[in-house]
């Protein structure tokens, strides 16, 4: 069972381009099904972004794309990537983020470009918060590559822990109904009118209620990490609900 979110043909499009922003959206993978309904628009958008990326490179010049041996060894220990993959990601990150830092405003722009028919602002803020481990208001390469390693190559438990941290807005170790509702509302705003939901998931409130009904085993109105992981592993339909896949799962 995967906790990903993008159809394979979009994976191929994204991976052939390889920019930092695209990979963030690809691997977070919360909105399963969205891209099936937007393939033509996304191909066109991808081509536009490739032109923008080339323009940025021409305007800014070549940036340092080499890691020190000790840095490379450290990233190898902390991630599931090979040395060559880390070098390539670092080169791309420095190309897309010449300052070495990805700000929240830049992060919002990435999501706005990928979800043009909705408002991705709030959801982008939540994902940014989860990437920004040290809470300094920016994402550096270490935070980027470590998060990418979990979301793209981590075990299901690791991916679910990462998702749990995003839903746990106040970091108290539990997801309240209100916290879940806030994230689900942000997802619905992001996908706009593109996604067609079944009646019992037609609103963020209905979808949140459905998730809690299936996950909150002790009926205390909040989800522990254990409930979150066990619920997702025992019932694949819950993973579908945590993503934004309107299919029957």
Image: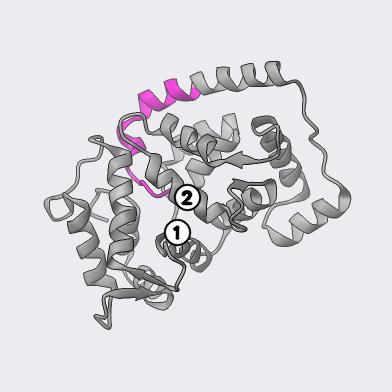
Q: Secondary structure at mark 2?
A: helix
Mark 1 residue crowding within 10 angstroms, few (<14) / some (14–19) / many (20+): many
Residue at 36%, 46% in the rendered image: 31
Q: Is residue 83 left or right of residue 108?
A: right
Magenta portion: prevailing SS class: helix
Is 31 part of what is drawn in magenta?
A: yes
Q: Is residue 9 left or right of residue 245?
A: right
Asked if the residue under mark 2 is in contact with the one under mark 1, i.e. CB atoms within 8 Å, the reply is yes
Q: Earlier in the sequence, mark 1 or mark 2?
A: 2
Say above or below: 100 vs 230. Answer: above
Q: Secondary structure at mark 1?
A: helix
Q: Which residue is mark 2?
A: 127
Q: Is residue 220 left or right of residue 17?
A: left
Say above or below: 219 vs 248. Answer: below
* Location of residue 118 in the rendering, given as x and y in whole percent from the top left corner: 31, 34
Q: Which residue is mark 1?
A: 166
Front residue (pair 45, 170): 170
* Location of residue 38 in the rendering, given as x and y in whole percent from the top left corner: 33, 30
- In the rendered image, the residue lying farthest to the front is 136
Residue 16 figure quarter = top right
Q: CA distance from mark 1 to mark 2?
A: 7 Å
* Location of residue 211 in the rendering, given as x and y in whole percent from the top left corner: 26, 65
Start and end of the magenta stretch?
28-46
Counting labels gives 2
Residue at 70%, 39% in the rendered image: 100
């Amino acid at each position: 069972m995967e906790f990903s979110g993008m159809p394979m043909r979009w994976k191929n499009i994204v991976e052939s381009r390889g920019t930092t922003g695209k990979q963030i959206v690809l691997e977070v993978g919360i909105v399963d099904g969205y891209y099936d309904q937007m393939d033509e628009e996304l191909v066109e958008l991808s081509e536009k972004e490739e032109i923008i990326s080339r323009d940025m490179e021409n305007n800014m010049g070549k940036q340092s794309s080499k890691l020190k041996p000790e840095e490379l060894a450290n990233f190898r220990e902390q991630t599931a990537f090979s040395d060559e993959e880390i070098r390539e990601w670092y080169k791309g990150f420095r190309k897309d983020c010449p300052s070495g830092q990805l700000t929240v405003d830049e992060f919002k722009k990435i999501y706005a470009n990928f979800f043009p028919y909705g408002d991705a602002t709030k959801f982008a803020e939540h994902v940014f918060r989860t990437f920004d481990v040290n809470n300094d208001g920016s994402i550096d390469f270490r935070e980027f590559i470590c998060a990418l390693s979990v979301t793209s190559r981590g075990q299901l438990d690791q991916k679910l822990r990462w998702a749990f941290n995003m839903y746990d807005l106040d970091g108290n170790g539990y997801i309240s109904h209100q916290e879940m509702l806030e994230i689900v509302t942000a997802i619905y705003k992001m996908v706009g009118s593109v996604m067609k939901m079944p009646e019992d998931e037609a609103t963020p409130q209905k979808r949140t209620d459905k998730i809690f009904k299936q996950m909150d085993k002790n009926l205390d109105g909040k989800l522990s990490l254990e409930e979150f992981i066990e619920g997702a592993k025992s019932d694949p339909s819950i993973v579908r609900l945590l993503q934004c896949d309107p299919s029957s799962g």
